[in-house]
């Protein structure tokens, strides 16, 4: 049996472990993991039911977070459609959260006077484009498209973030000056009316509200903003727009600043507009300077609330799941009282037993977390496919799911593990 | 028995193991001493039901931090020493009572302790199997192992070189096994 030479070497009682501490901790951890998996395999149904709470909790949170992050990504990409350095002068704010609408409704329209004042006086602005639109019928040949957005603007529109030209050209100064009947098509309109390569549309005849126009350019595809397609439009000179649709409607004016000078532009625009609109000094502004970050702000408020709900739901289900784990771990400790006694007799320290049960509860919880993460991502993907919402699986969300569930396992497993570690070995060995 | 196995502490008197008083050792140290110095053999075998024979035997080495490969080799060697060469991967419920007790003995031996403590080792076995186990103890004793066994069977006690008879917690006799056993002794020691 012997022949290994260690047998009679260890006389006397060792009082410290010293050098063997580290490998011992490792082998104990390895044993803990092995025991955990064999205990799980021994009670498959029980383990599955135990971890169900964690699975559902993590699945919910992961699905919600994936959807929110997907929305964030697509929204931030879409928001680039608006110029990052562009100020949109308008009668009303883009998004009104706290101002009452009735205070705004009697404001005077913005018109050519304000546009020309900005074009004439602003020294910061690099591009100034009027923006006005109606929905109207646009057709070519035998086809008519209903409810296409017809934009009235000028040559500066692309420079304010209005889009980029894919084929042909955008409107020119002279088109605007002479109110020429020329049009630049959004990608969807071009595809619908003039299928084929993008330059297939160039030079073709187009009907805008029944008037003949000539296509001079096609824009790059922009995609969607908050689910609204951005490519179903036609841009014509705002002078021509006025002749067809009247020029009494209020303009919005997009003004682009060089990077870093947006604030300076806003100050300048405020004084130009107040002068142009003869606002007396004691009165507040009767116009708004809008920027894309206002969208972002409202958007973040919205998703922030959603995040809050997700976290609330997640915490509740994780606590419920955690209690399930604690319950089953108490049962497991009870059932394995004798095993604990044997392990203690064979030299397991208290903390070894503690570790063993902690590993077991965290493994159960982490497996539940992994399953929940996978299901959550699947649910998010399914939602993304069946609805206009987007989904994104970010590593942070996955890490969050796994980390949280393992932490729940540790937290709720610690009391049963502590009870196991503090069993009296003599009692435990006698237990039937 | 529990005191000798360092599972319990004496309420009176002192216990010196390998010349050192164990009173005042902390729980961790007691666990380490149990691991290195004592091999337990129980009446009810006390094998872990879900672990194979070789995994059961490996346990004391796990708590000593012996690397996996060496652990496995030593456990297999211990199982061979008790005659279970071809039962290594069997679970306890696939083994007979005598085989289970052999696994338990291998587990007690694998850590090469200075003392084997056997509490009624044949109590749950039929007499033929019990006899095999007793013979195995005899062999181990012959190879230089110190074995302390507790028994109510005078015939078993009679075969031990030294026997101590304990009645109601007091030593009433101490001498060669054959003499003490003649009194119908409940407790025996093989030295």
Image (cartoon, rainbow, N blue to C red):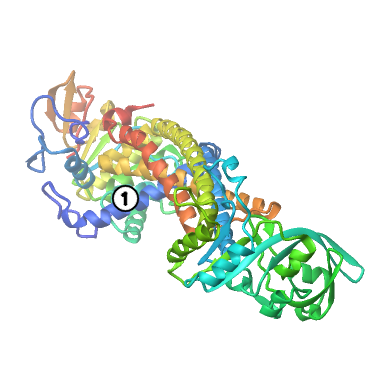
**Residue A399 in the image, given as x and y percentages of width and height:** 45, 54
User: For numbered disc 1, what is the local secondary structure?
Assistant: helix
**Residue A414 in the image, given as x and y percentages of width and height:** 34, 37
Residue B125, compared with residue A376, is above or below; it is: above
Tag 1 subunit: A
Residue B109, compared with residue A261, is above or below; it is: above
Q: Is residue B102 visible?
A: no
Q: Is residue A366 left or right of residue A49?
A: left
Q: How many marks?
A: 1
Q: Residues within 10 Å of mark 1 (few under 14, many from 20)?
A: many
Quadrant where the C terminus of chain B is found in the figure: top left
**Residue A28 in the image, given as x and y percentages of width and height:** 31, 50
**Residue A55 in the image, given as x and y percentages of width and height:** 53, 43
Quadrant where the N terminus of chain B is found in the figure: top left
Q: Is residue A168 visible?
A: yes
Q: Foreground residue, B30 or A44?
A: A44
Q: Is residue A126 left or right of residue A380?
A: left
């Amino acid at each position: 049996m012997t022949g290994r030479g260690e047998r009679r070497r260890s006389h006397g009682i060792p009082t410290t472990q010293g050098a063997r501490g580290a490998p011992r901790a490792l082998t104990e951890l390895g044993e803990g993991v092995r025991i955990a998996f064999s205990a799980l395999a021994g009670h498959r149904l029980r383990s599955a039911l135990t971890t169900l709470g964690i699975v559902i909790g993590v699945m919910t949170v992961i699905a919600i977070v994936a959807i929110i992050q997907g929305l964030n990504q697509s929204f931030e990409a879409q928001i680039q459609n608006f110029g990052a350095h562009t100020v949109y002068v308008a009668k009303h704010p883009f998004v009104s959260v706290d101002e009452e609408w009735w205070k705004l409704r009697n404001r005077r329209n913005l018109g050519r006077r304000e546009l020309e004042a900005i074009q004439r006086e602003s020294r910061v602005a690099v591009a100034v484009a009027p923006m006005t639109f109606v929905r109207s019928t646009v057709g070519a040949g035998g086809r008519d498209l209903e409810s296409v957005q017809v934009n009235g603007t000028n040559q500066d529109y692309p420079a304010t973030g209005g889009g980029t030209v894919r084929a042909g050209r955008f409107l020119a100064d002279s088109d605007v000056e002479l109110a020429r009947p020329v049009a630049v098509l959004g990608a969807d309109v071009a595809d619908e009316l003039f299928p084929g390569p993008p330059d297939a549309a160039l030079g073709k005849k187009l009907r805008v509200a029944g008037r003949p126009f000539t296509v001079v350019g096609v824009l790059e595809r922009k995609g969607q903003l908050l689910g609204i397609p951005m490519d179903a439009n036609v841009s014509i000179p705002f002078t021509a727009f006025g002749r067809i649709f009247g020029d009494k409607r209020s303009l919005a004016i997009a003004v682009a600043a060089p990077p870093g000078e947006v604030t300076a532009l806003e100050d300048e625009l405020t004084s130009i507009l107040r002068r142009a609109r003869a606002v007396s000094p004691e009165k507040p502004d009767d116009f708004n300077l809008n920027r894309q970050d206002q969208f972002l702000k409202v958007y973040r408020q919205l998703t922030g609330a959603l995040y809050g709900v997700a976290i609330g739901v997640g915490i509740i289900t994780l606590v419920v799941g955690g209690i399930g784990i604690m319950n089953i771990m108490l049962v497991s400790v009870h059932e394995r009282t004798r095993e604990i006694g044997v392990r203690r007799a064979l030299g397991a320290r208290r903390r070894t037993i503690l570790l063993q049960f902690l590993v077991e509860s965290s493994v159960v919880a982490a497996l539940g977390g992994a399953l929940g993460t996978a299901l959550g991502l699947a649910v998010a993907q399914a939602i993304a496919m069946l609805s206009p919402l987007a989904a994104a699986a970010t590593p942070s969300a996955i890490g969050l799911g796994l980390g949280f569930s393992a932490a729940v396992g540790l937290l709720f497993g610690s009391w049963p593990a502590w009870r196991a570690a503090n069993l009296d070995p003599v009692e435990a060995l006698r237990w039937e | 028995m529990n005191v000798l196995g360092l599972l319990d502490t004496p309420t009176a008197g002192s216990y010196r193991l390998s010349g050192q008083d164990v009173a005042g050792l902390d729980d961790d140290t007691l666990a380490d001493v149990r691991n290195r110095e004592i091999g337990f053999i129980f009446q009810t075998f006390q094998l872990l039901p879900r672990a194979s024979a070789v995994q059961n035997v490996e346990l004391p080495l796990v708590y000593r931090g012996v690397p996996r490969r060496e652990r496995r080799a030593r456990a297999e060697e211990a199982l061979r020493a008790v005659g279970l060469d071809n039962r290594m991967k069997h679970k306890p419920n696939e083994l007979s009572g005598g085989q289970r007790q052999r696994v338990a003995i291998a587990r007690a031996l694998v850590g090469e302790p200075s003392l084997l403590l056997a509490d009624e080792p044949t109590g749950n076995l039929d007499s033929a199997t019990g006899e095999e186990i007793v013979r195995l103890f005899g062999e181990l004793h012959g190879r230089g192992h110190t074995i302390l066994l507790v028994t109510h069977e005078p015939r078993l006690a009679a075969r031990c070189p030294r026997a101590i008879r304990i009645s109601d917690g007091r030593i009433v006799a101490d001498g060669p096994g054959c003499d003490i056993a003649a009194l119908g002794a409940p407790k025996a020691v093989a030295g």
